[in-house]
Image: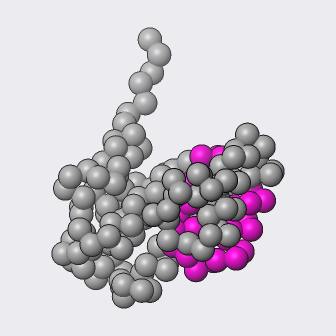
Amino acid sequence: MQADAERVSWFQVPEDIKQLLILAAEHWENTSESEKYINQALAKTEESTDVLVAAYRYFFYKNNYHMALQTAVKVINKIKLSEQIPEKWELSKPILISRKEDPKIRLYLNAYAAYGLVLAKLGDIDKAKEISIQVKGIDNKNEFGASILYSILTCPIEEDE
């Protein structure tokens, strides 16, 4: 277990939380077991952005889109609050553009783009398109995948001949 903890030494969470996340990874094939560890980590540290991001990814790759959505929203709201990002997109866009290289803003844009992806997976295509357009307007390097998502969502369906 110590070697695993050393592999995630950059992860800024208490050691007991790291161990829970490692156990979740080790029990990946047993969803109920691994989810138990993720939920324990979340319960012990709801406020840790690192744990929220790990949980979002876990739920997304386990196809638990409702939990992935809830977790992405927590990340978005947490950063919105700490970085004083306005609710209205028209007001937040210039802030996001000017600070898009800031690690917290990058995480916000990643989480927001992920939120759009999960909405698409859940069938809310219109909202997913809206979010992908918003992120595309900031992401001139296509680092957050919004352009790809938008292309997929707006691609005409080919009919069989």
Q: Is residue 101 above or below residue 148?
A: below
Q: Quadrant of residue 105?
A: bottom left
**20 or 61, nearer to the observer:** 20
Toward the right, the furthest residue is 32
Does any portion of residue 73 appear in the rendered image? Answer: no
Report the colour scheme.
one colour
Residue closest to the eye, 119 or 34: 34
Q: Is residue 62 magenta?
A: yes
Quarter of the image that includes the C terminus: top left
Magenta stretch: helix, strand or loop mostly: helix
- The answer to whether residue 10 of the structure is visible from this angle is yes
- Estimate the x, y position of residue 6 in percent, counting from the top left: 53, 57
Between 32 and 113, the one nearer to me in the picture: 32
Number of numbered labels in the structure image: 0
Residue 21: image location, x then y, percent? 65, 59
Residue at screen point 72% across, 74% down: 43
State whether residue 27 is above or below residue 81: above
Q: Residue at x 28, y 82 (%)?
A: 91
- Residue 130 is inside the magenta segment: no
Image location of residue 47, percent across then percent down? 58, 80
139 relative to 21 in the view: left or right = left
Q: Give percent across and percent down for residue 96.
A: 27, 74
Query: Which residue occupies 33% across, 66% down?
Result: 106
- Give the residue drawn at x 65%, y 49%: 25
- 161 and 38: which one is in front? 38
Residue found farthest to the front: 2
- Residue span colored magenta: 35-64
Q: Quarter of the image holding residue 86?
A: bottom left
| Apparent side of residue 104 relative to residue 70 in the rendered image (left or right) | left
